[in-house]
Amino acid sequence: MEWRLVKAEVDQPMESAEAIYQEQVAKGFLTAKLDDLVAWGRAHSLWPFNFGLSCCYVEMATALTSRHDMSRFGAEVIRATPRQADLIVIAGTVFRKMAPVVQHLYDQLLEPKWVISMGSCANSGGMFDIYSVVQGVDKFLPVDVYVPGCPPRPEALMQGLTLLQEAVKARPRPYSWIVGEDGEVSKYQPSQRDARTPARMRVTDLEEPAHVGDAPLSKELLRQKSPSPATPGRDGTGRRR
Amino acid sequence: MAEVVEQPAPETAAGETGSELEALRQRLGPDIQIQHTVDGIPNLWVPRSRLLEVMGGLKKDYPLLFDLSAVDERVRSNRNGLPDADFTVFYHLISLEKNSDLRIKVALADSDSSLPSLTSVWPAANWYEREAYDMFGVNFEGHPNLYRILTPALWEGHPLRKEHPARATEMDPFRMTDELLDAQQESLRFKPEEWGMSRGAKHTDFMFLNLGPNHPSVHGVFRIALQLDGEVVVDAVPDIGYHHRGAEKMGERQSWHTYIPYTDRVDYLGGVMNNLPYVMAVEKMAGIEVPDRAKVIRIMMSEFFRIASHLLFFGTFAQDVGQMSPVFYMFADRERLFSIVEAITGGRMHPSWFRIGGVGQDLPEGWDTMVRDFVDYMPARVDHYDKMATQNGILKRRTIGVGQYDSAEAVEWGITGPGMRATGLDWDLRKKRPYGGYDQFDFEVPLAANGDCYDRCVVRVEEIRQSLRIIRQCLDNMPAGPYKADHPQATPPPKERTMQDIETLIQHFLNVSWGPVIPPSECSTMIEATKGWNSYYLTSDGGTMSYRTRIRTPSFPHLQMIPLISRGFMIADLIAIIASIDFVMADVDR
């Protein structure tokens, strides 16, 4: 810090405003709109609720565990009670018998709260246009992000999460009815399909998947043979029971 | 006395031999009509008045009540001399000793669809009869709690009756109203008196605890109402149906071919293994012989999914009794496995890759390297997990002696698969009734003795090793040749020749748009699935769609047994018991 001795004089500012400002900036202070700051904080500390309905939940669990580890993106450890969570991933089919329970759980989530609809069933009923299935969770819950797939791969859910984070940043929600107006600031959300169509249309070579390497994740992953911690088993003597 | 024979003559693998059937017929009397179906299982039509007497007599020889459901016969055209019926209730019985099956059928009129309950003979009939009541409106006289089981308590109509709409879009759209929420909450309120429970004993007031339908430890949307004395479970009432996706009704509106993806989602951890009993049943009805290469590919993929399912079981089981880390290791290995599944089928959890007459595509180049890498890599990992989880002292103390049942109880309650073999009963369908080419493979059937939570885990861990053995044999002995049968009903038909001649093009067009037409017949096929015996009992009325698709899943009876094996244990033990059963709710509610 720079310093010097000056003589104290009444009605004389000790430093010019610009110099003070520059000094504060150098100290690492940040000035921002409260809305933006809170939205940034909210986007990177989402607390998902441990909630699953069917097959999609297995892929959601895959996204949460090793290799994918969704907490890298700031969606931390899943909470077992809705009262400690602010994000619900509707992972699976929404059954008529289960729908009131889903509503009940949603009502208990902390405000402000977000909803990701994961998989075709939750998006629209998908292949289950059948008497016992609600044709999409958006029939009764406000959905923020739809993740397509049956089930979506873990990477798709992670992409959905990052899209949600962008939306959280772009569309701040009120802190409380005491501080300001209720309701959210809505902003047009571009369709991902429209955004990606030009790039997809440029793909001209679609080859038959005749080789294992054609699968996106296949060979390289398997080749990463991690040094096995269980060497005693390799010679056949390690087998117990 | 009439006898109805469906093509081809009954060369039974599973059913009674001719002489034994004759003896049975003599014993039961002249008012029993016999029907032969293509699966070789004799069907005995028994008059309703004699049901209890006949079943009581058969139980000694056929102690396993494998399945019980009904068929709505009202719009079926090809009945070929079967007794007049608006509804047929059928009971599938199995003798483990003789390794044979029997199907008992009872004809009912719509105006009087009522028959005696079997719960006094087989306790396991309880849930099955509730399901048949829920789905068809058939009344079982003398049933202790004949409530709806799969549909919500407030549901109107019986979904598997032909007049009930199949599609949600044929019905009024779903609306969430406050009235609905209140009514549903009220209907979920547990009333102990309905289940014959008292609210208190001499020195204690019982507490009734609602576990589920959303709880981290119940593995899906499953609810149990618990009667507790302190922390001790006095009694439990499992409540299912939160995952009912109408898979059986779906079969009545999808073509034989386009139904395959729905089978994947029944046991959603079993992937393509779910396709197997379904396509095998259709192939038997159509008379398709599957080429060897397709058989071996099917076995290899099925065993991959057995490993994937068992790994998930293993990880979550260890987690439920308090070990945090194993599940992370096992999910990483599942990813390795899925990379192979994806390279071969293009899908991960639900490839829907088996076809009527074969599989979807041939194996891609380089599959053998991937598979070899995996089977070289995995055994050491299993040993490591064995050391990390199953040899762990805390896990042992939490699970040994908990949730125990013996072989007789397993048979009585219809427990199959690893849960049955954990009691020491040496019954693996892959050995006892080798299907789809399993007789060509060298593997052992892991057994345990105590039938507790720990043994159920140990059996599955050993099954992973045996599955790896089978996969290695597939790898070393993969036959050359076609991956799909050269048969007009094989779907979709070969594409290569479609641009060469018009006949093949027409055939291809029809088989893809309408789907194959399967001759009128009935067939059930069962396999040793990841969780137990899974069977499809298909009825064709000679159309492009199934007339009735009955899916017998292993987890349904397994959950029914929970009260029996959890009484007297603590709540934490109940969590271990639930984890050790290894179920997914789609496999229960379908």
Image (tube, coloured by chain):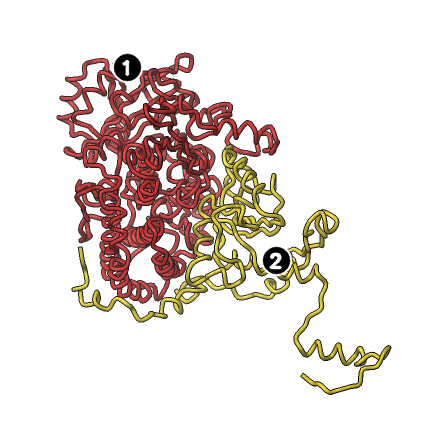
Q: Report the side of A35 relative to B505 (left or right).
A: right
Q: Is residue B319 left or right of residue A190?
A: left
Chain on which label 2 sits:
A
Specify the colour of chain A: yellow
Q: Chain of mark 1?
A: B
**Does any portion of residue B478 appear in the rendered image?**
no
Q: Residue at x 60, y 56 (%)?
A: A164
In the image, is residue A209 above or below residue B78?
below
Q: Dot 2: what SS?
A: helix
| Residue A46 location (% of width, % of height) | 56, 56
Crowding at label 2, few (<14), some or many (≥20) Cα neighbours within 10 Å? some
Q: Which residue is mark 2?
A: A42
Q: Position of residue A41 (x, y in %)?
A: 61, 61
* Residue B433 percent location from the top left of the image: 20, 41
Q: Quadrant of residue B35?
A: top left
Answer left or right for A7 relative to B272: right
Residue to which mark 1 is pinned: B47
Q: Residue at x 47, y 43 (%)?
A: A53
Front residue of A99 and B135: A99
Q: Chain B colour? A: red
**Tag shown at residue B192:** none
Q: Quadrant of the N terminus of chain B?
A: top left
Farthest right residue in view: A11
The residue type indicated by label 1 comes to Pro
Q: Quadrant of residue B179?
A: top right
Q: Residue at x 28, y 14 (%)?
A: B47
Looking at the image, which residue is at 34% across and 63% down?
A: B367
Q: Amino acid at mark 2?
A: Arg
